[in-house]
Every structure is written in structure tokens, then in C-alpha cells.
Amino acid sequence: MVMSVDSILQTEKQLVAALYKFVSLPDFDEIKPRLEEVCSSNSIVGTILLAEEGINGTVCGPREGVVALMQWLWSDARFADLAPKYSESDGPAFIRMKVKLKREIVTMGQKGIDPNRLVGRYVKPKDWNALIADPDTLVIDTRNNYEYAIGTFENAVDPATTTFREFPKWVDDNLKRKPEAERPKKIAMFCTGGIRCEKATAFMLEQGFNEVYHLEGGILKYLEEVPEAESMWKGECFVFDQRVSVRHGLQQGHYDLCHACRMPITDEERASDKYEQGVSCPHCYDSLTDDQKMRFQERQKQIRLAKERNEQHIGRKMPPREPKQEHQQNIEAES
């Protein structure tokens, strides 16, 4: 159910709204400039992806700004039942606002996968524990390896993917090639906000798996609704914003982010001699070239100098460099 405007306004901190919907948007490119204007005029930051198959994104802003954005979206009949998942942030959860046009709102790279036509069975958070505790159920974490590493459900399988594009191959290598008698009777899948596992269930059904389930609202809804004392979730949940991770009750977690490789890092990893703020961490130190480290050190220096001048460095538009060189991990937008 869509959260009411009154309930949104009761919150004191900035709001983070994670949203997605698979819906036919043949005019998705025409929506972009209008959506950008609404976000800009209401001080909204974040990322929203638009494609012919729908909308997907996470945004953050003042309470009134989020209200205005949602009311604008709900005014389009195609988004009338769009139900964001709300959480709070002590400050802006993103640096800038980006509205991007894509081929897919979550990239699997498989043609013909349409959750509006074929999709798995939704499972409410309150019913999830019983499903994944069933010994006949194979529980699959459809997120990436760095997300799995900091938290997942008990007994969940890690496909060890670095992008969602790799998931179909994992299914082919590890499940589809098994004889029918050896395949799992039930498959339960989950992700952060629901979009990846929703598309994954459509894919699994296309591949001939019959009893396929997914967690409605994703991990975020589970952590919001299921009491910690009853929870089968272990660890924290990676989120694609400045908070890095959240825990039960959607409280901000304990992880930081390496701004070189974009991996979540612990306090212990920050204490490593391989960690240098903005330059490297134990995950990427050995894979970075000396040239990359020098560039990251210069970038971090400019950030520090800008901060001393009370200027913004990250997020500020800079003149283009030739050749353009950037080092960043391919992190998909998730809601």
C-alpha cells in the first residue's frame, strides 16, 4: 500500500525513497526531462532509471520534496499504485540527481523476460521465515558478492556474481543442467528492494522451474516489518547510497565505503595499512596500479582543499578531461 502524505510528513529526517515498477513505458524518453525538473525543483537527489519496461530508482530529499515527487508520479495512471519503500537518512544520501535512459531498469541481458507477463509467487515478509526454513526450499541471494558478504538470510546460496548479468549463467551451470529429479522442489529468491528477484523469478519460470517464490518488498521490507528477535537475517544490508548499509528497523549500519573500488568496508579494514581514505582498501590495494593510486591521492587532496574552502568538490561539475579515465566498479541501481 502506498504510504500516505501525512505519514511521510511525520518524519523529521531526510527521506530516502526506493521505488520500482515493471510497466510499459513506450514514452520513457519523454518522461525524463519532466522528471528531472520535478526532482530539481524539489531538491531531490539520487538516481532514477527509465526504460520501456518501467522505472527503477532510489532518491532522497526533504520531506516536502519527496511528497511532491511522489504526488507527481502518482498522477500518471501507470504509476498510481507505485509503492516506495521509505527509510531515513541524517543527511543527503546521494550527491547529485541523475535520470538515465536504459534498455532495462535492472540489467539481466536476457530478451523476452517480462515480469508483467510471467512472475514468481510473492511472499510477504511475515511468511518468509516459514518458506526458507522448509528443507525442500533452495534459497538464492540474487544480489552481488559484495552485498552477500556483509549480510544475508540463513542458509542462502551465494551465486558469487559481480553483476546481475551473470545470474543466468549461474542458473545454467548450477541448476538447469541437473536432472529433473535432482532439481530443488521450491526456489525462494530475494534482493535488496525486490526488483532483481522479481525479474529473476520471471527468468526461472522461463527456464522451466515451476515453484518459484520471491520476497515481496525485498530485504528492506523484511528488516522494516519483521522484529529482530524473530529474524532469520544475519548481518547488514548493503544499500546503494551514502549510508552504505542498513540493519533491522532500517537504521543506518556500521559500514563505510571505499571510494576507490566502491566496496563496503569495516572499521577493522579501515585500520589496515592497505587503507588510505579515497585511495585504496584491503579489497583493491593489490589490484591498483601506481598511476591509479597517485590519481586517487590527488583527487582526495582536492576534496580536502575544497572542504577547507567550504566548497563542494564531489558532485561539482568539472570541465571534461582528455582522455577521460575513471576507476569505478559497475554497481547497478537498486531499489
Image (cartoon, rainbow, N blue to C red):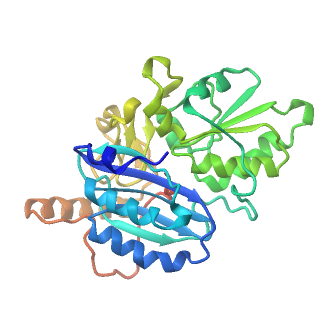
Q: Compared to 238, does 129 lie above or below?
A: above
Q: Position of residue 49 (x, y in %)?
A: 50, 65
Left or right, 246 with respect to 31, comes to left
Q: Position of residue 243 (x, y in %)?
A: 33, 45
Q: Compared to 178, does 311 lie above or below?
A: below
Q: Position of residue 26 (x, y in %)?
A: 62, 76
**Residue visible at 56% across and 42% down in the picture:** 191
In this view, the residue farthest toward the left is 309
**Residue visible at 77% across and 32% down in the picture:** 186
Residue 115 location, quadrant: bottom right
- Regarding residue 195, the answer to whether it shows in the image is yes
- Regarding residue 242, the answer to whether it shows in the image is no
Q: Compared to 110, does 38 lie above or below?
A: below
Q: Nearer the viewer, residue 204 or 325?
A: 204
**Residue visible at 45% across and 17% down in the picture:** 229
Left or right, 47 with respect to 30, comes to left
Q: How many marks?
A: 0
Left or right, 37 with respect to 176, comes to left
